[in-house]
Amino acid sequence: MLSKLIHHNSDLKRLMDEGYEIEVRGGHLIVHQIPYVNSKCELIIGKLITPLELSGEKTIKPQHTIHFMGEHPCHNDGSILSSIKHSEVNQKLFDDIDLNFMFSNKPPNGYDNHYEKVIRYIELITAPAKSIDKNSTAATFKVIECNEEHSIFNYLDTNSSRANINYINDKFKGLRIGIIGLGGTGSYILDLVAKTPVEQILLFDDDEFLLHNAFRAPGAPSIETLNKKMKKVVYFTGLYSNMRKNIVPHDVKIVEENATLLRDLDFVFISVDSNIARNTIISKLLNFQVPFIDVGLGVEIKNDTLTAILRATLGTATMYEHLPTRIGSINGGDDDYSTNIQIADLNAMNALMAVIKWKRYIGFYKDLKEEHNITFTVNTGQMLNDDFAT
């Protein structure tokens, strides 16, 4: 079954109906089998690639530039086709798709739709090929179906496609992530992780989503929603399932008896306010060899102002000696970075510290320091890194 995206947009459907070999992948439109002439006057095949400009599921007026996979197209005498020349790119988009060149050919008013844009570039690129072989055509009438049905998202990630980072996003694929605790910080962690193409997100919390939670969590729930007193895992699963698949709610606290729920996860975020609970969870994760980040947030009132320290601590099966010092032992009382005062911006900041560190840990971002503990002091604006990998 062809993607409804093509059938709901006349410009994409017209390309398909006229026989062009189109594919929609990762927020990009790829047009295969473009015949062209290279500098050796040989007839070869390339691909045109352009981000899909969308509003919802409807295409909108596209940008005028386009990318090309192949050598730079030439005239039939081997000279560069200068009417489209712009810049050399040489950037990987997908495992099998490279962006070698960017072309530019802008009409006075731009292109009204993707059909006009693609057809114009095809005309310019294939004209020299047709002069050598009149049967050269990009209209193969072979259709490649859109594979967005396999995407973890319910709609195209055009943000990543516009930035050409889909191949870097592949580092998230297949990962099963756990989030323990959906209070202020945990809910912001979910908000950030949900926007990555991880395979599955498992939520663990047995509390209800109440009025005070609305002021320290992402989004803006209605009075009707708050009056339902839903479990947090139910509320947040419903909210983020609008965007993505495979959010799995567990209406439980993680304790010794059910900790096996964490055994097969690839990474876990811990956002709880009890050292007894966190040490039980951490002990099990270390035994299961599942890496994790534990977060903490402490706010105090001093002279009619607030001071705060935020913490994000990474633990792995190969580096865990720092954990008692940073997090506290099971007999050490509550976490020094945990108080009852919660502020949405501090929760969001604490979540950002944790998620950015996780992204560095898995290689999405470059990690030059490989620190395992990060603290941010609000009243000085100072961020400190400690416990570096050897």
Image: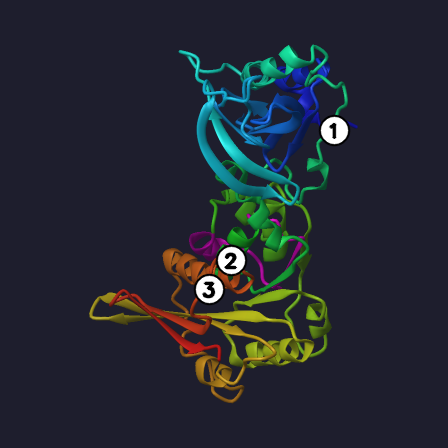
Q: Earlier in the sequence, mark 2 or mark 1?
A: 1
Whether residue 213 appears in magenta in the rendering, the answer is: yes
> Foreground: 237 or 45?
45
Q: Is residue 274 visible from the viewing direction of this image?
A: yes
Q: Residue furthest left?
A: 303
Mark 2 sits on what residue? 189
Q: Residue at x 50, y 14 (%)?
A: 112
| Nearer to us: label 2 or label 1 | 1
Q: Secondary structure at mark 2?
A: helix
Q: Name which quarter of the figure residue 85 lies in.
A: top left
Q: Earlier in the sequence, mark 2 or mark 3?
A: 2
Q: Residue at x 40, y 59 (%)?
A: 349
Q: What distance separates the C-alpha of mark 2 from that of mark 1?
A: 37 Å
Residue range of the region highlighted in magenta in the rendering? 195-217
Residue 94: image location, x then y, percent = 62, 43
Mark 3 sits on what residue? 367
Q: Residues within 10 Å of mark 2 (few under 14, many from 20)?
A: many
**Label pair 2/1, CB-CB below 8 angstroms:** no
